[in-house]
Amino acid sequence: MAPSGSRSVDCWTVLYWIPVLFISAIVAWSYYAYVVQLCIETIENMGEKIVYLLVYHVLFIMFSWSYWQTIFTKPMNPLKEFHLSHSDKELLEREDRRESQQEILRRIAKDLPIYTRTMSGAIRYCDRCLLLKPDRCHHCSACDMCILKMDHHCPWVNNCVGFANYKFFMLFLAYSLLYCLFVTATDLQYFIQFWTNGLPDTQAKFHIMFLFFAASTFSVSLAFLFAYHCWLVCKNRSTLEAFRAPAFQHGPDKNGFSLGITKNFRQVFGDEKKYWLLPVFSSLGDGCSFPTCLVNVDPEQPSSPSGRNPSIKSVGDSHQFPPKPLRESQSRLLNNGQSEGSEDRDKRGTSNPALTIEKET
């Protein structure tokens, strides 16, 4: 007899897949309603029918491809150097005082590219996964694991959206929006004919009516969601970071990972333009470390009374942090920082703060 605990886990697993099955059923019905009932049974003009079917199937394939990539791309595990060794685990477990535990964690984190802290300034540590959390990494209670550059856990894909599949999620939103807009636009004239009794009294008319309502409704909600995530990409923030700014050693800084719109976009979609519209992985980096800079010009960021951003330390400040090695993709993102800064100065007529790498004690 199977233990009751395993049966309860199986039940939750089935429940988690209900939203995905619901979306899949809606898409399958929309395919039947559009291809069979609208294009084949209702549209009489052969040229219009061929064009509609061709464009529809391109959007349908790209939408389905990006959706399933978002669902079945497993989150990437943090690199092994972020996991505690057996001796470090035992040493940490023997310590009861928080200060002593933090000393151990600081010693381990000294040689790792970790720049963010908790809001209290402590080293970010996951006691369930037994690892030092890389920057932008968070533990997902639904997946029960640490997710690299976690954005959110999405029930509609039954998966966490993070570094491994964020590009797929963005393309899923884009293609699903285009899919719904195309269906709405091409179905509109036949929807109007339904209300003016211009369609023959067959079952096709009901599919056409409900198809228009479903596509237009999803278009509105998808448009808002897609616009929001486009804003996040331009700012190089995750949903979690939009609600709570990441904390560095100098304090919370919502622009700490922003490198400018172009570089922010390339961090998600990569450097090769031929892969931008395809649901294939092309994001830069390894998900465990990210280039950081302190940006002083942001209309959303209130300035201090002296006109200086308090989050930016001067060269003469007491804390000097040793530089950490950056991987190739990160270095490439930062190489042109000074040239872009000079272009911004020419446009604004004001000085742009120097691009600074966040360093750690």
Image: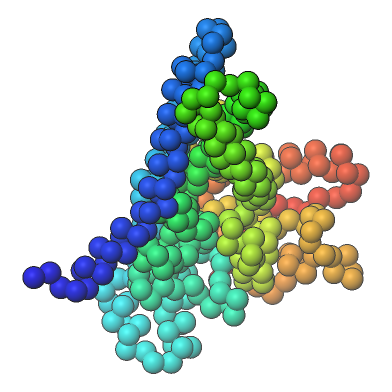
The quarter of the rendered structure image containing the N terminus is bottom left
- Seen from the viewer's position, the closer of residues 137 and 64 is 64
Q: How many numbered marks, from 0 up?
A: 0
Residue visible at 47% across and 33% down in the picture: 30
Residue toward you, 360 or 143 = 143
Image point 26% across, 69% down: which residue?
8
**Residue 58: image location, x then y, percent:** 48, 23
State the image coordinates of residue 210 (x, y, percent, origin top left).
Answer: 54, 37
- Residue at 49% in and 25% down: 202
Q: How is the structure coloured here? A: rainbow
Image quarter for residue 146?
bottom left
Asked whether residue 146 is in view, the answer is: yes
> In the figure, 358 relative to 60: above or below?
below
Q: Is residue 190 left or right of residue 82?
A: right
Residue 228 placement (x, y as % from top left)? 65, 49
- In the current view of this chain or complex, which residue is farthest to the bottom? 96
Q: Is residue 329 visible?
A: no
Q: Quadrant of the C terminus?
A: bottom right
| Residue at the spot 89% in from the left edge and 71% down from the top edge | 305
On the image, the x and y values in percent for residue 301 come to 79, 61
User: Which residue is outermost to the left?
Assistant: 1
